[in-house]
Image (cartoon, helix red, strand yellow):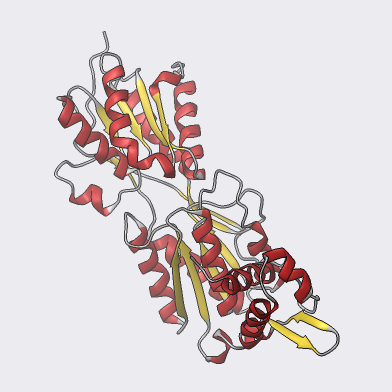
Amino acid sequence: MKPKYQLIIDDIKSYILSGTYKTGEKIPSELALQESYNVSRQTVRKAILELSNEGFLRSERGSGTYVSSQYRSRTGTKTMNKTIGVITTYISDYIFPSIIRGIESRLNEDNYSLLLASTNNDISQEKKALEMMLSYGVDGLIIEPTRSNVYNPNIAYYLSFKEQDVPFTMINAYYEELEVPFFCLDDVQSSYLATRELIAKGHTQIGIIAKMDDLQGKFRMKGFIKALGEAKLRFQQEHVLSFDTSTKSDLSANLEVYLNDNRDELTALVCYNDEVGLEVVNVCRELGISIPDDLSIIGQDNSYIAKNANIKLTTLTHPQEQMGRDAADWVIKNLQGKKDLPVSTYYQPVLIEGETVKAIEVE
């Protein structure tokens, strides 16, 4: 349990960093804060003193307490090296080490420092990461959005970066509410190519496992539907298994039910990514479903886990390291005053054949 003065500090910092309280604006009086937080005057004064020491507030005798921007000059701008903040959903998992490696290699070339944070695809952790970046005073920012297919309550923080002329770009996805440059795989095309490959191999009963709280999942579903439509195949809701960040831990159990329910009908599956594809492989082994004899599957992203698995997963490429380099290059060029930088960059996926797809006889 946080001490009461720390709750006041955290709230006021959030209001300042998100732009709710503007620089030079007077904050509520000590009495108002006492009543609002149901605390003593001493507790309020302790919070205000600490915020003043950190450069977030300044007090004027007989007038009140005002928002200060002094905190910005006490942090990153002290050093000669410019610092680029990087916020990703995960750091050590899946394709993220490769993306970060690409960012770091490009920043090193121009002697930029990197400040790294992750959100675990959690909105409240994203808020903390954004507040840290704003407090530190990063010169630029590269962000992988958190739960990009649902409304994000942290939009105000991004607008604060814009107001402060801090350049930022997004990778893997973007927030549709914001006009922001981004670097993304063409996720519609990735799932489209996966589905088309299965159709070309004679499959007509094709399912999809889709993660729907991220924009990638929405677009990969779109590519799946597009390929079915072109082939005049019916989209069947019962062939869709969707999940999100909160239900990911239940995926194995849900896959067991889904595969059992559809085992007499489905012959192929498009998987949200390689991680899901390998989870399907594991569940199929438990259920006695042979891959690819009974079920063909395609992953996406060409991740290291697909390369190192004991079955060679058919998958599609993801730029990973190149995306990281390009995003870092965009921020550096923006800080150098370069104009006409790209506002949207899509990388085209390529199918990589593995051992998990089999052609079926057309009767």
Q: Is 103 or 288 nearer to us in this picture? A: 288
Any part of residue 120 in sight = yes
Quarter of the image holding residue 211? Answer: top left
Q: Taking 62 as reference, is 226 left or right?
A: left
Q: Position of residue 344 (x, y in %)?
A: 58, 55
Q: Taking 113 as reference, is 64 left or right?
A: right
Q: Is 184 or 352 nearer to us in this picture? A: 184
Of all residues, the one furthest to the front in this rendering is: 40
Quarter of the image holding residue 3? Answer: bottom right
Task: State the residue at coordinates (48%, 53%).
Answer: 122
Any part of residue 138 in sight = no
Image quarter of the C terminus? top left
Q: Taking 120 as reference, is 264 left or right?
A: left
Task: State the residue at coordinates (43%, 74%).
Answer: 106
Of all residues, the one furthest to the right in this rendering is: 62
In this picture, is 213 found above or below 159?
above
Task: State the residue at coordinates (63%, 48%).
Answer: 176
Quarter of the image holding residue 141? Answer: bottom right
Q: How many marks?
A: 0
Q: Position of residue 68 (x, y in %)?
A: 72, 82
Task: State the residue at coordinates (43%, 64%).
Answer: 324
In this picture, is 135 found above or below 120?
below
In this picture, is 88 found above or below 352?
below
Q: Position of residue 164 (x, y in %)?
A: 69, 74
